[in-house]
Amino acid sequence: MKNKILFGLVLFIYLFLPIIILLMPSLFKYKFVILTIVGIIFYILFRILHIERKELGISKDNIISSIKRNLVLMIVGLLIILVILGMGLNKFVPNENIWFYPFYILISVPIQEFLYRGVFGYFDKYIIKNKIVMILLSSFCYSFVHIIYHDILTCILTFIIGIIWYIIYNKDKNLMGVISSHIVLGILTIVLGIVD
């Protein structure tokens, strides 16, 4: 029963917050603050409910295999950025200050992976045992949060990469690999001007 209520709360928050930011555009500039607060609250809530960090993908187990599984994505991402930069096709226009990047790497990406891979990875054991349904639900929620950018391409790309990251995460149940991959691909999309 505890897990069903918790799952309902997670889905509600994951769907409610992007809608609120869309309806109240003044909140857009606080999107990363909101993400950080939600991540911290959910982490504390899960720990209060005695859910082990390992069940959320936060563990020393399988770190190396998790990173290895994500290496292909990282290498392909780096090759793409080199080709596009070499061809002069990037449309990067900086709209964040220099402090955004350490925040993105050290806080934002780990929280996103915790919320969309770790949390859903926990629930796929207790709530929805059909892996395909959970992969699609997790990827939809991850994509849906990106509606605040008003860009369909961003939503499509995040849905696709969400599926890939969830499948990879599910093999090792360790967030380090998908965090590493997310950092590389996230910076890539920012540098190429695909995402603001």
Image: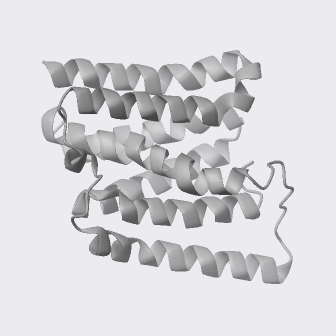
User: What residue sits 77% from the left and 58% below the top?
Assistant: 193
In screen coordinates, is 101 left or right of 47?
right
User: Residue 187 in the image: x percent, y percent?
Assistant: 65, 62
Q: Nearer the viewer, residue 80 or 41?
A: 41
Quadrant housing residue 86:
bottom right
User: Residue 95 in the image: x percent, y percent?
Assistant: 83, 48
Quadrant housing residue 114:
top left
192 up-or-down from 21: above or below: below
User: What residue sits 75% from the left and 63% below the top?
Assistant: 191
Q: Nearer the viewer, residue 179 or 196?
A: 179
User: What residue sits 36% from the left and 26% below the top?
Assistant: 10
Q: Nearer the viewer, residue 141 or 30?
A: 30
60 up-or-down from 41: above or below: below
Quadrant where the N terminus is found in the figure: top left
User: What residue sits 32% from the left and 46% below the top?
Assistant: 118
User: Residue 71 in the image: x percent, y percent?
Assistant: 43, 77
